[in-house]
Amino acid sequence: MNEYTLDQYNECVETDCDPYNIKGIREDFPILKTLVHGKPLVYLDNAATTHKPRQVINAVNAFYAEYNSNIHRGVHKLSQIATDKYEDARRTVKSFINAKHLEEIIFTSGTTDSINLVVSSYGRKFLKEGDNVIISTMEHHSNIVPWQMLREEKNIELRVIPIDENGDLIFDEFVKLIDENTKFVSVTHISNALGTVNPIKHIIEKAHESNIPVLIDGAQSVHHTKIDVQYLDCDFFVFSGHKIYGPTGIGILYGKKEFLEKMPPHKGGGDMILSVRFDRTIYNDLPYKFEAGTPNIAGAIGLAEAIKYIDDICIKVIARHENELLNYATNLINELDGVRIIGNARNKSSVISFVMDNAHPHDIGTMLDIDGVAIRTGHHCAEPVMRRYKIPATARASFGLYNTKEEIDVLINSIIKVNKMFS
Ligand code: 7TS
């Protein structure tokens, strides 16, 4: 990641991190041995979801095989073990993003769920007709549609920060959008369609000058760069387990205690109450107020294991490795005739979106698949980005901690084949 300097990287390597053991890392991921159409899998669809190391798979298996039980409810041994593991997972997440309080960590089913929680709880309670919410052109649909649903209900206004041709957010335009009716800013840290790394610290500072709360969508960032929510001073931060080498169906909403405390529950049911009577129900304290019903216990345990896995390698070392892959692939793709990278922001993370003069992205994806190369094609749930560039879709290669330069060579050779076939 460009956010880290070489000095920081060296400091990290010299102190508490081992050198990058790519061979050992790849051994941890059973799926990487898979053959696709008889060819070794080259998995470059990590922005959609990442694969799971053995440690995560084993932790999930152990839950079901050894101590499967519901949590917070039983005095019996297995329920106590499950409860302890679930709450340990919350502590792991807290220290991973450096939250101040444990009760600021809410388990959800993923980024989409976390954003919807904030919109339906905070948005419904505190936003009113005439207020405006600022998002950006490069949001994933899950940070657009919930706000549009609130717009229908409350008649609020949605304002959109434009991006320039390179895919950089235009900060001055953001500043111009803020007025006395701006009541919320919700932006992505890293664009899943362009790879742009947004200057979220500056965005947060600017919004806070006018006391506007900020939500950061960290779905594409938390596994590529060190997140410290106290340093960032964001009011909400959301991410998904499955994108950071953990299970599907689990995610995190971090919210500052002062906000979460004044927000009403968005779902009613078991666990989110202290007492229920027909005439009056008393809601539970944080974080349980927002965790109605039996949660994804195995998912939380698996997520904690994924975080430990990342921590063991060291996020800065992962960032360095992925940045090398990004630069390597960018240089090679830029040399190819008829291939154009969409998104050349100043700061980019491990995503390369591209189009070809002669082949539609879906054809590129299908042809690459024959060579065992898994990439994503389409609008990546970011249709406004496609519209900004006047293209229907892109082909997108996205890198993870287990990818290698040799795999990028396979990608490039496969793109060259497509180029020849369609020209
Ligand atoms: N926000 C961003 C920036 C994302 O990239 C995604 C998923 C989401 C939110 C939604 O996450 P979920 O886990 O709740 O689904 N992005 C992608 C992608 O790029 N390809 O598939 C899913």
Image (cartoon, rainbow, N blue to C red):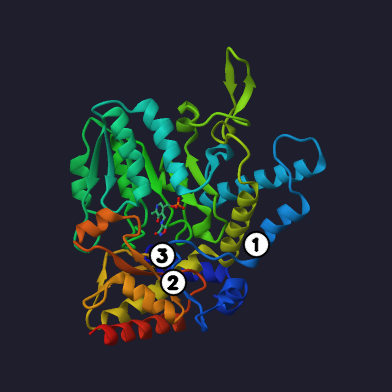
Asked whether, in this view, residue 195 is left or right of residue 87, the answer is left
Mark 3 or mark 2: whose residue is earlier in sequence: 3
Q: Classify mark 1: residues with Cα within 10 Å, few (<14), some (14-19) or many (20+).
A: some
Furthest toward the right, the residue is: 77
**Image disc number at residue 57:** 1
Q: Which residue is mark 3?
A: 4
Percent position of residue 355, x then y: 26, 72
Residue 383's image quarter? bottom left
Mark 1 or mark 2: whose residue is earlier in sequence: 2
Secondary structure under the numbered disc 1 in the rendered image: helix
Q: Which residue is mark 2?
A: 44
The amino acid sitting under disc 2 is Leu
Furthest toward the top, the residue is: 279
Residue 277's image quarter? top right
Above or below for 360 versus 305: below
Percent position of residue 334, x then y: 26, 79
Q: CA distance from mark 1 to mark 2?
A: 21 Å
Q: Which marked residue is nearer to the observer: mark 3 or mark 2?
A: 2
Asked whether, in this view, residue 180 is left or right of residue 230, the answer is left
| Cβ atoms at labels 1 and 3 below 8 Å apart | no
Above or below for 6 versus 413: above
